[in-house]
Image: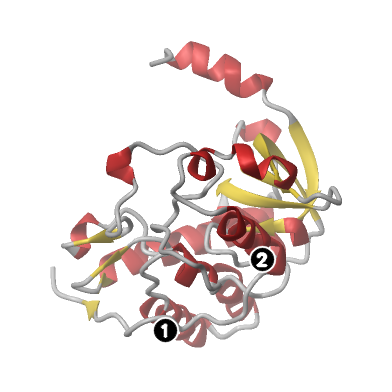
Amino acid sequence: MLSPAISRIFWRALPRVTVPISSLASYAGFRYGRSEHPYERYIIDRRRGNPDGARESFIDSLCHYRPRDLGEALDINLSQRVPLWCFPWYRYFPWQWTPERGWYSRAALVPDVMTYFSEEGILMSRIEKEFRWLDRAMASMTSEGYRPEAYRNFVEVVTLQASDFAEVHIVHDGNHRVAALAALGESTIKAVRLGTVRASEVDRWPAVRAGRVSVSDAIAIFRAYFAGRARLRIGEPARVITSP
């Protein structure tokens, strides 16, 4: 494991890029700048003076987005199941490539209520944390703007590059800030690029080489981030758990 000092040196060496907000996507394939992502819609509704409606709509979105695998998460048909968030261009240990990936037995164990799930439901306390993070991002971006150099806190992206060199950037870190900037009507953002995934190299993607994902399924997953998505309701709605 690298020491914190060495890790910071490597991070600083990563390229800084300015990209259109409309080219950004979340892990779930929601494109920003289109009001697709529940984060962005929440902030838009808040800014329109409808806080109660914003909260109700956001909770409804969380309760109805319950994908069991990556195909469902991206709203695409695949020839075989791919576990949640097991992208074919990354390398995984065998114990990470399991059908249950992304689902937890207890709601209290869920690390992120937007991309991880529990049969028990969703803790209201975790939803309230999301509201606080989103409200803080909205207030900060409204009053101070996005100042990554000042705070040493860049949005982090992984770039997907198509064969025609068109690009989409998956937000690895900073979705709340991106949602706020998109809702505020900003057109571009500075980000740190963690890496680039090229469609032309699909045969060399680790999960494809390992035989876990076919080339056609890998390309379908890749293209899903370019298409974006509108459908949100997947699976049975979750129960909101209000007790401790």
Q: Amino acid at mark 2?
A: Arg
Q: Residues within 10 Å of mark 1 (few under 14, many from 20)?
A: some
**Front-lying residue, 110 or 184:** 110
What is the number of callouts on the image?
A: 2
Q: Which mark is residue 60?
A: 1
Residue 84 seen in the figure: yes
Find residue 154 and report its horizontal and vertical position in percent: 63, 38
Q: In terms of image quadrants, where is residue 131?
A: bottom left
**What is the spatial separation of the Cα atoms under label 2 and label 1, in whole angstroms?**
19 Å
**Front-lying residue, 32 or 234:** 234
Q: In terms of image quadrants, where is residue 153?
A: top right
Q: Is residue 91 found left or right of 240 in the rendered image? A: right
Q: Quadrant of the C terminus?
A: bottom left
Secondary-structure class at tag 1: helix
* Residue at the left extreme of this rendering: 244
For disc 2, the marked residue is 31
Find residue 138 and report its horizontal and vertical position in percent: 60, 61
Q: Indicate which disc, 2 or 1, sits on the residue closer to the N terminus.
A: 2
Using the image, determine if residue 234 lies above or below residue 193.
below
**Residue at 21% of width from left, 64% of height from top?**
107
Find residue 3 and report its horizontal and vertical position in percent: 42, 12
Q: Amino acid at mark 1?
A: Asp
Using the image, determine if residue 46 lies above or below residue 148.
below
Q: Is residue 141 found left or right of 54 in the rendered image? A: right
Residue 155 seen in the figure: no
Secondary-structure class at tag 2: loop
